[in-house]
Amino acid sequence: MLEHALIDKITSTNLQLPVMEHFYSLQGEGYFSGQAAYFVRLAGCDVGCVWCDVKESWDATLHPLKSVDEIVAGARSHQGKLCVITGGEPLLYDLTHLTKALHEAGFIVNIETSASSPFTGHWDWICISPKKFKAPLPENMLLAHELKIIVFNISDFEWAEKQALMVSPTCKLYLQPEWDKANEILPLIINYIKDHPQWQLSLQTHKFLNIP
């Protein structure tokens, strides 16, 4: 469970954030797949997907606080200029200062979020991956450049279409199989996209490549 007092304290200052991990790799999913990117995984999540593959990120109190300056310094130590903020659920925090500092350091700044909390920060690319476990805020959906639906069972196709009605006409639409059910779900997604070509396939290519 989240320690909400800690979350509130961090949000009120936004100069320090709980970081579960940070690493330089290739973006494995969605629109920027294959590009070099520096990832900052913030700890803390109030969504609680049953199939989440980073449940260790949920409790923010288990992970160290890092200053915005430390986070930016880590990003600057690598050649790539794409920085992806993910979680956990990164929108639990005020990300205004972090995104400003990353932009000043010359980064393209992307976010991956369930959009279940209010938006803060200034973003070059917003990937919303809404979850049934805690619905996205409707006002957030029109901000999405990319909608990524994780398909866990066949009912998720209908749910995906409902989410697609909430985003802008220019938003990229992706269906991605849940990793542990990929063998079962992937053929269904392929057939669905052939019948509904407004959607594209997203794969967790970093898992196939065995990289972070």
Image: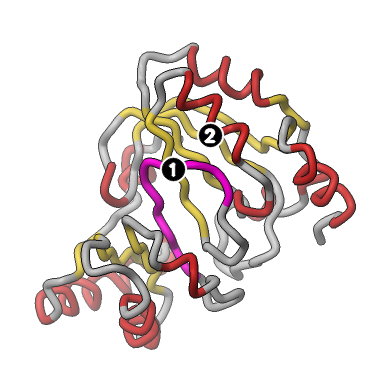
Residues at badges 2 and 1 in contact (C-beta under 8 Å)?
yes
Corner quadrant of residue 33: top left
Residue marked by disc 1 = 123
Q: Position of residue 188 (x, y in %)?
A: 24, 78
Q: Residues within 10 Å of mark 1 (few under 14, many from 20)?
A: some
Q: At 61% from the left edge and 24% from the top edge, which residue is drawn?
A: 71
Describe the element under mark 1 as helix, strand or loop. Answer: loop
Q: Nearer the viewer, residue 63 or 7?
A: 7
Residue 210, percent from left and from top: 39, 37
Q: Is residue 182 magenta?
A: no
Which span is picked out in magenta?
Answer: 120-130
The answer to whether 83 appears left or right of 190 in the picture is right
CA distance separating discs 2 and 1: 7 Å
Left or right of 14 on screen, residue 118 = left
Colour pattern of the rendering: secondary structure
User: Mark 2 falls on what kind of element?
Assistant: helix
Residue beneath label 2, please?
99
Q: In the image, residue 61 lies at what x, y percent?
A: 83, 44
**Quarter of the picture holding the N terminus:** bottom right
Q: Is residue 74 left or right of residue 185?
A: right
Q: Residues within 10 Å of mark 2 (few under 14, many from 20)?
A: many
Q: Where 118 sits versus 86, above or below?
A: below
Q: Is residue 122 magenta?
A: yes
Q: Residue at x 41, y 65 (%)?
A: 178
Spot occupied by residue 135 in the image (x, y as percentages of width and height): 56, 76
